[in-house]
Image (spheres, helix red, strand yellow):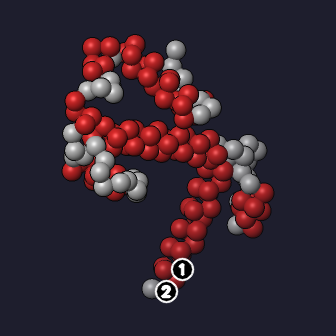
Amino acid sequence: MITKLAEVASLPDASALANAHMTSTYHDRLGLFRRDQAWRNHPISQKQIEILRRFRIPHPERLNSGQASQLINYATLLRLNERQAQATRLEAPATPGQLKYLRWLRIVPEKGLTKREAGRLIRDSKRRRDQRRVAARQ
């Protein structure tokens, strides 16, 4: 049974779900995930420092490789959860403001139009308007 991360109520539940998946799917590689592995106590790697910076995660200077790995994993889970939430929001019905603006643009919105579709129609309309303005200047 595969469960989407967005269907999980909390970060600990997501972690438990991921742990169960890893245990059942990658049982031959579980040494990488055990907290008592020697690599976890090594100094943080340059690659981990780069990833933490890219994710804009503040971290103490005396962080070991295992702690950095855990921070990166949590940040990855949070980013994935936010992307899924964003995708869900975009599939919601178009807002009243979007519908009003589409009508002002003389575009008749179809029934069941989503935020994503309304946004595309608005962007496309603005792009065509800008192209017409540029062409008119020439």
Q: Where residue 42 sits: x, y (%)?
A: 21, 39
The residue depicted at 48 percent of the width and 29 percent of the height is 15
Q: Where residue 56 sits: x, y (%)?
A: 40, 57
Is residue 87 at all visible to an observer of this figure?
A: no
Q: Quadrant of residue 85?
A: top right
Q: 121 or 44, which lies in front?
A: 44
Within 10 Å of the Cα at label 2, are there few (<14), some (14-19), or many (20+) other Cα atoms? few
Looking at numbered disc 2 in the image, what kind of residue is underneath it? Arg
Looking at numbered disc 1 in the image, what kind of residue is underneath it? Arg
Distance Cα–Cα, label 2 vs label 1: 6 Å
Q: Where residue 116 sits: x, y (%)?
A: 61, 50
Q: Is residue 128 above or below residue 61?
A: below
Q: 116 or 135, which lies in front?
A: 116
The residue depicted at 30 percent of the width and 26 percent of the height is 36
Q: Residue furthest bottom?
A: 137
Horizontal side, residue 78 vs residue 24: left or right: right
Q: Quadrant of residue 82?
A: top right
Q: Are marks 2 and 1 in contact (CB under 8 Å)?
A: yes
Give the residue number, with chain letter if any, for mark 2. 137
Q: Where residue 44 sits: x, y (%)?
A: 24, 46
The residue depicted at 53 percent of the width and 40 percent of the height is 81
Give the residue number, with chain letter if any, for mark 1. 133
Tell me the SS state at disc 2. Answer: helix
Horizontal side, residue 49 vs residue 89: left or right: left
